[in-house]
């Protein structure tokens, strides 16, 4: 299975600032996904980032707040913009090879906003 | 749309007890089903999977059978250990519409195993 590295693993940020999270995969993958996991909650899909096309955002998430880049088949970034305490969550990237194969997840980025 | 319903937690068991975590789903078509585990302070790890009806996924002593007739994928383990303490997520990978595949998660069940 793919090995996924996320950076940073955790950060504490000031209100109003932005943070870019990186997701690096050790093999080429078609599908990459970004999720948010609020404290004590399940995972919510933010967007799907397939290389060569614009990211597709789920209801409740917008590009201005969570811009995503997918420059190649092994890398993606998620930016959390103009952060507020409500953005304190774990952000996870995952990769998928095909619809009948499971997604694999990075270890996540634990973000706290003061 | 697709949905996954998991039994509410937290669940506290003594070591060597039998574990069942119930999971039922609603989906169109023929989704793939997964159990993921999240240990404290870590990301999600795939525990087991089943891609078609009557498939049994198994790993680390955990098992789950894809039951299409009851739309269920219950997780079981015969004898839990303290190291099994984690949050367990049931998930469905299916067509969310217009050919767009999406992983839908249950709310998670926190398991604590005490010595």
Image (cartoon, coloured by chain):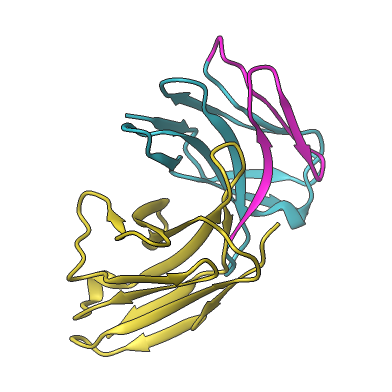
Colour of chain A in the rendered structure image: yellow
Image quarter in which the C terminus of chain B is found: bottom right
Location of residue B3 in the rendering, given as x and y in whole percent from the top left corner: 39, 31
- Residue drawn where x is 46% and y is 78% of the image: A22
Image chain in cyan: B
- Residue drawn where x is 24% and y is 76% of the image: A85
Q: Is residue B49 magenta?
A: yes
Q: Quadrant of residue A83?
A: bottom left
Vertical placement of residue B53 versus A57, above or below = above
Given residues B15 and A64, the one toward you in this image is A64
Is residue B37 found left or right of B103 in the rendered image? right
Magenta region, residue range:
B44-70
Image quarter in which the N terminus of chain B is found: top left
Q: Is residue B10 visible?
A: yes
Location of residue A90 in the rendering, given as x and y in whole percent from the top left corner: 42, 68
Given residues A63 and A8, the one toward you in this image is A63
Given residues A38 and B92, the one toward you in this image is B92
- Residue drawn where x is 41% and y is 61% of the image: A34
Location of residue B9 in the rendering, given as x and y in whole percent from the top left corner: 50, 42
- Residue drawn where x is 50% and y is 37% of the image: B93
Location of residue A33 in the rendering, given as x and y in whole percent from the top left corner: 44, 57
Q: What number of labels is visible?
A: 0
Vertical placement of residue A37 versus B113, above or below = below
Q: Residue most toward the front? A: A52
Is residue B55 found left or right of A76 in the rendered image? right
């Amino acid at each position: 299975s793919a090995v996924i590295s996320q950076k940073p693993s955790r950060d504490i940020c000031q209100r109003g600032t932005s943070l870019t999270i990186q997701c690096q995969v050790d093999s080429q993958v078609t599908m990459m996904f970004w999720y948010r996991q609020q404290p004590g909650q399940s995972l919510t899909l933010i967007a799907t980032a397939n290389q060569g096309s614009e990211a597709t955002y789920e209801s409740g998430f917008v590009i201005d707040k969570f811009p995503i880049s997918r420059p190649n088949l092994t890398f993606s970034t998620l930016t959390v913009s103009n952060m507020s305490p409500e953005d304190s969550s774990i952000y996870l990237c995952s990769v998928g090879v095909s619809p009948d194969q499971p997604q694999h997840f990075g270890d996540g980025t634990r973000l706290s906003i003061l | 749309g697709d949905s996954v319903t998991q039994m509410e937690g937290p669940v506290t068991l003594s070591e060597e007890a039998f574990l069942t975590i119930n999971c039922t789903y609603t989906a169109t078509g023929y989704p793939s089903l997964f159990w993921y585990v999240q240990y404290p302070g870590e990301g999600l790890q795939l525990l087991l999977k089943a891609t078609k009806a009557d498939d049994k996924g198994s790993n680390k002593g955990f098992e789950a059978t894809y039951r299409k007739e009851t739309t269920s994928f219950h997780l079981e383990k015969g004898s839990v250990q303290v190291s099994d303490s984690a949050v367990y997520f049931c998930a469905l990978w299916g067509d969310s519409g217009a050919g767009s595949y999406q992983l839908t998660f249950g709310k998670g069940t926190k398991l604590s195993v005490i010595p």
